[in-house]
Amino acid sequence: MPRNRPERVSIEGREFEPGAVYAPRDGRGNCRRLLAYEPDGEWPGGKVVTRIISRSSRCRHRDPVCGTWWARWAGERVTEAGK
């Protein structure tokens, strides 16, 4: 693995790449870029910070979610980190 790529993180037993964009598992809704993950006891499954990638507007805001929700929501990776 190239050294400039971020290390993968394990969230609720699934591996994710920070910086990559993921599509919703059910195919409905906007994609999200995984910005950060912290194993934080106050958030079920840890704290996941994402950026919503809206297809219909330029609005792209940060959205913190719990790791449990993220692991259920996230489907396939759409792009790798840095692309």
Image: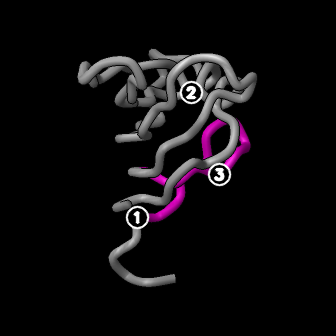
Q: Is residue 81 above or below residue 14?
A: below
Mark 1 element type: loop
Residue position for label 2: 67
Question: On the rendered structure, is 58 left or right of 27?
Answer: left
CA separation, marks 1 and 2? 18 Å
Residue type at the position of mark 2: Gly
Mark 3 element type: strand
Q: Is residue 29 above or below residue 15?
A: above
CA separation, marks 3 and 2? 12 Å
Report crowding for label 2: few under 14, some 14 to 19, many 20 or more residues within 10 A (C-alpha). Answer: many
Question: On the rendered structure, is 74 left or right of 30?
Answer: right
Choose top left, top right, bottom left or bottom right for residue 24. top right
Report crowding for label 3: few under 14, some 14 to 19, many 20 or more residues within 10 A (C-alpha). Answer: few
Residue type at the position of mark 1: Pro
Residue position for label 3: 15
Split into 4 quadrants, where in the image is the C terminus? Answer: bottom left
Percent position of residue 16, x then y: 58, 50
Residue type at the position of mark 3: Glu
Q: Are marks 3 and 2 in contact (CB under 8 Å)?
A: no
Q: Which mark is residue 6?
A: 1
